[in-house]
Image (cartoon, helix red, strand yellow):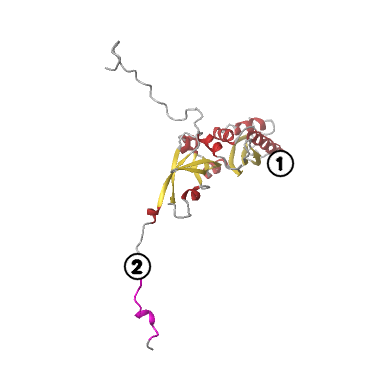
């Protein structure tokens, strides 16, 4: 072997091995605060790297989308098939203020509705709320047998499907257009729109299991802190647990104080 060819063997290591640093030491936790229309205000936590130089932690948090079950937000197991998407709009201290970003339905619920020998009717519409949000709403419904029907199948003709779809689009547009986004979300959580469509379509063809299965916020107005704080302001409705009645304290007449 020629001398001086294998230079790496003669060189000593400069820095030695780098110490393994736990990456979680550089991170901090932030609380997620849900809007006041939900029963649970503090709905979780999120993690981010601490502010370093020009990389500010709060800027990295803004725009994050969190998906939660409506059952957890409203402490109601009946609504477990609904998924709510909330977006971080502002950061105050270690609190992340969330706003509505979308709604979806769980896959198992959707699969349980789809059966043979019936027609699926789907519709979608882009609607504008009074406060400038553009939302895309998707509706789904299924045909059902008429009373005293002997025939096994209950398929609807394409003309009737089109008529029902027009009713769906009209109902969803009216729902979104008559109020702001907060009013729309309250109506979606209540879930009464599906029953309204079933009633309206009953004259065309009997339908069942009508749901607004998905809602997307397509366009948002310019960010306004005041509008966001309205979502987080308590509107006087008691959505939490009942408080135990106050126990009257015993006092002696004329003593001017407690026993």
Name the quadrant containing residue 190.
top right
Residue 254 falls left or right of residue 38: left
- Outermost residue toward the bottom? 2
Q: Disc count in the image?
A: 2
Labels 1 and 2: the sequence-earlier one: 2
Residue 129 as seen in the image, left or right of residue 13:
right
Write the residue at 37% across / 21% down. 246
- Tell me the quadrant of the picture where the N terminus can be found: bottom left
- Where's residue 152, x and y in %? 63, 38
The answer to which of 240 and 210 lies nearer the viewer is 240
Residue 113, image x, y percentages: 56, 40
* Residue assigned mark 1: 158
Give the secondary structure at mark 1. helix
Query: Is residue 1 among the parts visible in the rendering?
Result: no
Instruction: Please identify the quarter of the rendering in which residue 116 is found.
Output: top right
- Give the percent coordinates (x, y) of residue 58: 48, 48
59 or 214: nearer the viewer: 59
Neighbor class of circle 1 (other Cα within 10 Å; few <14, some 14-19, many 20+) is: few
The nearer-to-camera label among 1 and 2 is 2
Quadrant occupied by the C terminus: top left
x, y (%) of residue 245? Answer: 38, 22
The stretch in magenta equals 4-16
Q: Residue furthest right?
A: 159
Q: Nearer the viewer, residue 143 or 37?
A: 37
Specify the principal SS of the magenta part. Answer: loop
Residue hosting label 2: 17
């Amino acid at each position: 072997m020629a001398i001086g060819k294998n230079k790496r063997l003669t060189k000593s290591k400069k820095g030695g091995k780098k110490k393994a640093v736990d990456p979680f030491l550089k991170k901090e936790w932030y609380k997620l605060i849900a809007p006041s229309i939900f029963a649970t205000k503090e709905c979780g936590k999120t993690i981010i790297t601490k502010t370093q130089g020009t990389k500010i932690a709060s800027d990295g948090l803004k725009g994050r989308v969190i998906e939660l079950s409506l059952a957890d937000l409203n402490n109601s197991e009946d609504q477990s098939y609904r998924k709510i998407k909330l977006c971080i709009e502002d950061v105050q201290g270690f609190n992340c203020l969330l706003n509505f970003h979308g709604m979806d339905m769980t896959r198992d619920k959707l699969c349980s509705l789809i059966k043979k020998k019936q027609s699926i009717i789907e519709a979608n519409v882009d609607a504008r709320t009074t406060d400038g949000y553009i939302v895309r709403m998707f509706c789904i419904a299924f045909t059902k047998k008429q009373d005293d029907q002997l025939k096994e199948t209950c398929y609807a003709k394409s003309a009737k499907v089109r008529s029902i779809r027009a009713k769906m689009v009209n109902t969803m547009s009216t729902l979104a257009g008559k109020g702001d986004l907060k009013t729309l979300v309250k109506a979606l959580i209540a879930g009464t729109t599906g029953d309204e469509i079933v009633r309206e379509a009953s004259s065309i063809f009997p339908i069942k299991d009508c749901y607004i299965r998905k809602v997307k916020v397509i366009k948002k107005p310019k960010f306004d802190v005041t509008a966001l704080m309205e979502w987080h302001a308590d509107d006087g409705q008691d959505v939490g647990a009942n408080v135990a009645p106050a126990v009257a304290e015993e006092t002696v007449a004329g003593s001017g104080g407690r026993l």
